[in-house]
Amino acid sequence: MSHNIAVIPGDGIGVEVMPEGVRALEAAARRFDLDFKFTDIDFASCDYFERHGKMMPDDWRDRLGGMDALFFGAVGMPERVPDHISLWGSLLQFRRAFDQYVNLRPCRLMPGIKSPLAGRAPGDIDFYVVRENTEGEYSSVGGRMFEGTDREVVIQDTVMTRTGIDRVLKFAFELAKTRPRQKLTSATKSNGISITMPYWDERVLEMAKSYPDISVDKFHIDILTANFVLHPDWFDVVVASNLFGDILSDLGPACTGTIGVAPSANINPEGHFPSLFEPVHGSAPDIFGRGIANPIGQIWSAAMMLEHLGHIDAGKAVVDAIERVLAAGPSDAPLTPDLGGRGTTSELGETIAEAIKTG
Amino acid sequence: MSHNIAVIPGDGIGVEVMPEGVRALEAAARRFDLDFKFTDIDFASCDYFERHGKMMPDDWRDRLGGMDALFFGAVGMPERVPDHISLWGSLLQFRRAFDQYVNLRPCRLMPGIKSPLAGRAPGDIDFYVVRENTEGEYSSVGGRMFEGTDREVVIQDTVMTRTGIDRVLKFAFELAKTRPRQKLTSATKSNGISITMPYWDERVLEMAKSYPDISVDKFHIDILTANFVLHPDWFDVVVASNLFGDILSDLGPACTGTIGVAPSANINPEGHFPSLFEPVHGSAPDIFGRGIANPIGQIWSAAMMLEHLGHIDAGKAVVDAIERVLAAGPSDAPLTPDLGGRGTTSELGETIAEAIKTG
Ligand SMILES: CC(C)[C@H](C(=O)O)[C@@H](O)C(=O)O
Ligand SMILES: CC(C)[C@H](C(=O)O)[C@@H](O)C(=O)O
């Protein structure tokens, strides 16, 4: 079975970690007898923007829409292109145009990684953030008035729909059903954000009726972030709006030691459009060019892509390889500086690829 | 000099910790020869709501507007009154009607308290969150359409004004000037929230021109929450919108061990209206009624009130008393269970009041 994969490195360390993601896929393909056709994409990058005055060619939908999956690095070089232009011109377009309404982000404390939280060991932190990925606070409705005067005002609408909320809740409840603890936590802020978030709460209550075996709780986002730090062991599946999910899926991985290893899947569950797989970290202009970026977020994203394409064993083999290399520790594996080692991006990528091949 | 103080305990543990806050004020009054006239307020509580069908009497503005300060506990009993009704009917009214546009929240790791972050000791975490407190994401503009149908949609506007942003930024920059590190961090999300947050960034850049000695950086809220956990020592003064400030001022105190001790000041800097002082924690229905709530957040808020009223020495004496009692530890002081002790709310409150008197 052959898969067409668009390879979209983007900017900054996206360009550095992407080859290691591809290397991991090739290693998995060799071992599990899979066939990938990679198409290199140079748009969705600030380089492209500087050459063409836009982030993507007009026919980007046609060029990507037929792919089996999009393998994405990171976008953004704020010194050169304002972030809202580069991101709304690329990644955020993909999520919407390809209706990738679930952003799935595992937060798991891996062997060999030290949590910044005192006394937490692998097994103590192991949950998923399920983030709504197409609407909510990330909206294109609003504007500015009285520009340049003292009464200047900017307005941006948060827009939530029953369809949009229900489908992501359904995904989250279904995921909770597959987990040992059968537990779902909803992120809200209905005490302060008094129009949209009470509606979110209502839909959670309604959906919960169809899942009587799942135990459901909710926290306001402020105390929820506090509880990620104080009680990360409380969580199993956390479902959240676009913005709250964005926050929780950086904070969660930080609690597991580094956001450098965290993966994510932007999923169109119906398969009408390609899904997109990318590390949680950004383009990190501050460390770009030094060859020390951690490629594990990209490689773990490859594992999520393999699972999504139906190659469960191959996906597990990649995660397994990551775990073995991490467990070896900085003295025996070329871990990158963020993991306490002195390895380079490609040394670590090669080591993991070897581990995938040998199994 | 005499001060009229409105005492508004509210709900839940607000009712339990408030007497300890008042006790601390009385102790400080005795030692520093101050005179407080306390007026007990029974509205702004769910009890009041159940008796009157509203959170406050119609003349609440008149009854509170002439006070020198409002001393507030916590509001909310979600089992009895939906949070958005109880909060928008009380606390959020105060903040707006009395134009308390700065919400100032210190995050400091206190002696004797164990941070959940590995290897952090007092001195490692010591910063302020300055939160915009009247506009932004906490808006009353929006609504619901197509109710009860599949195309149901809810919309809520985030509204930011130049006036609103600039005045809180000014407060934050002025605060940064008084701090040893002369550093200000702005919380943004201009890559995703593409209309309001780029405007926030612009105003920060503009205001920074008037403060050439302050070093300014910014982080998107997602990675900022990660950095609170990974690098809490990076921060000095963090300025944020209403929602982001809400999140950061729960997460910051969590990183310092417990939100049970964190205080806040809702300030109208011009003094046209009374300012409001309240613990960061909420009404905590889950532990209400057991007499074990930590009163330190309320007592530390009393210290902020004393400073605000011009009694700097008295404020410092209260913080100093808190620190000494905490440093004594659970074996020598009746610390509450959240601090690893077996003391009750009133035992801990009495001990701190004694420490204030003896100095
Ligand atoms: C109770 C709630 C409305 C309030 C807020 O969100 O402002 C609280 O969380 C706070 O931080 O003071
Ligand atoms: C880069 C940015 C627009 C993006 C987001 O906010 O969604 C990122 O933080 C993420 O989490 O994927």
Image (cartoon, coloured by chain):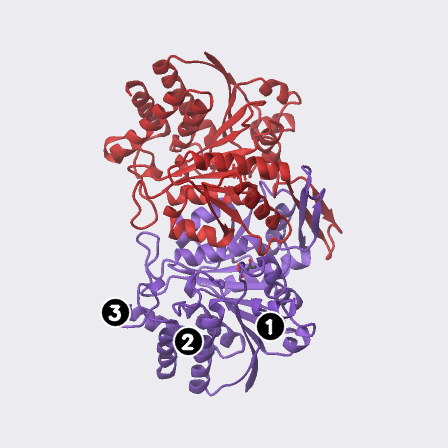
Chain colours: A purple, B red
Residue situated furthest right in the rendering: B146
At label 2, counting other C-alpha atoms closer than 10 Å, the crowd grade (few under 14, some 14-19, many 20 or more) is many
Q: Is residue B274 above or below residue B336?
A: above
Could you tell me residue B268's position as x and y percent? 55, 28
Chain containing the residue with disc 3: A
Tag of residue A331: 3
Chain where mark 1 sits: A
Q: Quadrant of residue A165?
A: bottom right
Mark 2 residue type: Val
Determine which of the numbered discs, if any, sits on residue A43 in the image: 1
Kindly identify which chain the residue marked by label 2 belongs to.
Answer: A
Marks 2 and 1 belong to one chain: yes
Q: Is residue B299 left or right of residue B169?
A: left
**Residue A201 visible in the displayed image:** no
Regarding ligand 2, which quadrant of the image does it lie in? bottom right
Q: Are marks 3 and 2 in contact (CB under 8 Å)?
A: no
Q: Residues within 10 Å of mark 1 (few under 14, many from 20)?
A: many
Ligand 2 within 8 A of label 2's CB?
Answer: no
CA gap, disc 1 to disc 3?
39 Å
Q: Amino acid under label 1?
A: Phe
Q: How far across and how far down the image is residue B48, in percent?
A: 59, 26
Residue designated by label 2: A318
Which percent across, then down, holds residue A80? Answer: 56, 61
Q: Which one is earlier in the sequence, the residue at label 1 or at label 3?
A: 1
